[in-house]
Image (cartoon, rainbow, N blue to C red):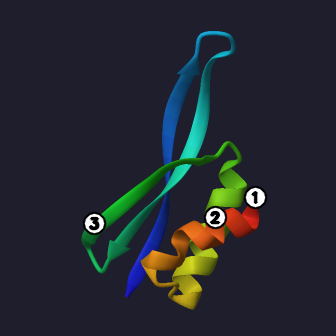
Amino acid sequence: MYHYRPVEATQFYADTGPFLTYGIAVYQGQQFLFLRPDVFTDRAVVEHICRLCTREQVEPIHLEDVIYDCL
């Protein structure tokens, strides 16, 4: 079973300073598969995507398509 979880990170740009971004970590059971960092700046959006992907058991190979569809 795949589990998609939000991951918070701090990014920094010289002209804007630090800000939070959220990525998606993918697990199969308890085993970490990969991290897609810096996807969105809105935590609620990433949490929603993670819930949907976990519920629908989206194959990890399709995560990029899901992200692009949400943009």
Q: Amino acid at mark 1?
A: Leu
Q: Are marks 2 and 1 in contact (CB under 8 Å)?
A: yes
In space, the residues marked 2 and 1 are separated at their CA atoms by 6 Å
In space, the residues marked 2 and 3 are separated at their CA atoms by 19 Å
Question: Tag 1: Cα neighbours inside 10 Å, few (<14), some, or many (≥20)?
Answer: few
**Label 3: which residue?**
32
Expressed as whole percent of the image width and height from the top left, the position of residue 39 reads 59, 50
Q: Residue at x 69, y 15 (%)?
A: 16
Q: Quadrant of residue 55?
A: bottom right
Expressed as whole percent of the image width and height from the top left, the position of residue 64 reads 55, 67
On screen, residue 65 versus residue 42, left or right, reads left
On screen, residue 57 versus residue 14, left or right, reads left
Of the pair 60 and 48, the residue shown nearer to us: 60
On screen, residue 34 versus residue 52, left or right, reads left
For marks 2 and 3 on the same chain, the one whose residue lies earlier in the sequence: 3
Q: Are marks 2 and 3 in contact (CB under 8 Å)?
A: no
**Quadrant where the N terminus lies?**
bottom left
Asked if residue 25 is positioned above or below residue 17 in the image, the reply reads: below
Asked if residue 36 is positioned above or below residue 21 in the image, the reply reads: below
Where disc 1 sits, the SS reads loop
Where disc 3 sits, the SS reads strand
Q: Which mark is residue 67?
A: 2
Of the pair 6 and 59, the residue shown nearer to us: 59
Expressed as whole percent of the image width and height from the top left, the position of residue 41 reads 67, 42
Q: Amino acid at mark 3?
A: Phe
Q: Which mark is residue 71?
A: 1
Q: Which mark is residue 31?
A: none
